[in-house]
């Protein structure tokens, strides 16, 4: 839960990886964001059949944001490296043409989200093919800062309402984990079924 972006794509060519990493490092250093570089060059500047062992590219982490992944498989497909162990043991997932990567940015704030989206606009045009993004704030789709602002306010409101509901929840004498979860879900369903997330309601 929380405002996030989902993205997928592949490198245009194996040989562009070092240049892409170099540009990203230059940018994240300006903002003093933490980053980790994985393998930074493909052997002979070529893609190969994927082994699901090695990862190429870079991760960077703005404050209060989940990591942003510009990381790729041996064949150039974008991938979340933390999911490799699951993909490696799942033949059906391996057959997919693309893997979606997810980053929650809500708690990083509007300005950080804006920088991330603008960076992806630049990188996707210069270094990536078949790139797609779904942005909960709709800033990627609209390039409209008013829409971005409204989306963050809406998600903040929803999270505040959810936090209030959890504070008010009374488990009573319920101690069994499964029963507790069912009771909580029923409570949330009843509460938000009546009130909704309409910012105009009290």
Image (spheres, rainbow, N blue to C red):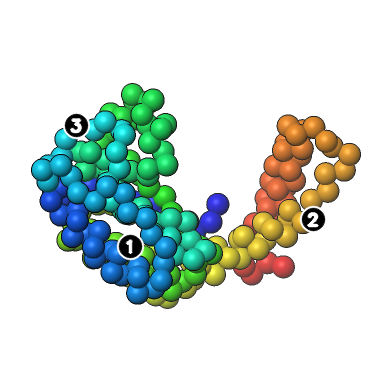
Residue 155, given in percent of the width and then of the height, sits at 55, 63
| Above or below, 19 relative to 71 | below
Residue 158 can be seen in this image: yes
| Left or right placement of residue 110 versus residue 169 in this view | left
- Residue identified by numbered label 1: 141
Tell me the SS state at disc 1: helix
Image location (x, y in percent) of residue 47: 15, 40
| Between discs 2 and 3, the one toward the N terminus | 3
At a point 31% along the width and 70% down the height, the residue shown is 27
> Which numbered dot is residue 168?
2
Mark closer to the observer (2, 3) = 3
Instruction: Residue at 64% x, 69% y: name it.
Output: 200
Callout 3 secondary element = loop
Seen from the viewer's position, the closer of residues 60 and 7 is 60
Q: Residue at x 28, y 51 (%)?
A: 57
Please give the residue where the numbered disc 3 appears in the rendered image. Answer: 49
Q: Position of residue 69 (x, y in %)?
A: 36, 53
Q: Nearer the viewer, mark 1 or mark 3?
A: 3
Residue 129 seen in the current view: no
Left or right, residue 124 beside residue 112: left
């Amino acid at each position: 839960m929380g405002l996030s972006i989902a993205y997928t794509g592949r490198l245009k060519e194996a040989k562009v990886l070092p240049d892409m990493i170099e540009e990203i490092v230059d940018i994240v250093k300006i903002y003093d964001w933490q980053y980790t570089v994985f393998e930074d060059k493909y052997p002979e500047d070529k893609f190969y059949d994927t082994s699901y062992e090695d990862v190429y590219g870079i991760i960077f982490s703005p404050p209060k944001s989940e990591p942003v992944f510009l990381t790729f498989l041996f064949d150039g497909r974008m991938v979340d490296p933390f999911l490799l162990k699951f993909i490696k043991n799942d033949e059906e997932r391996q057959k997919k043409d693309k893997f979606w990567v997810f980053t929650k940015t809500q708690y990083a704030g509007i300005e950080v989200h804006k920088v991330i989206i603008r960076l992806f606009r630049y990188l996707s045009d210069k270094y990536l093919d078949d790139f797609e993004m779904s942005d909960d704030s709709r800033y990627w789709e609209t390039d409209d800062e008013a829409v971005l602002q409204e989306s963050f306010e809406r998600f903040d409101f929803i999270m505040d309402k959810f936090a209030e509901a959890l504070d008010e929840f009374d488990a009573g004498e319920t101690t069994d984990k499964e029963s507790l979860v069912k009771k909580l879900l029923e409570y949330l369903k009843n509460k938000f079924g009546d009130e909704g997330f309409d910012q105009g309601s009290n």
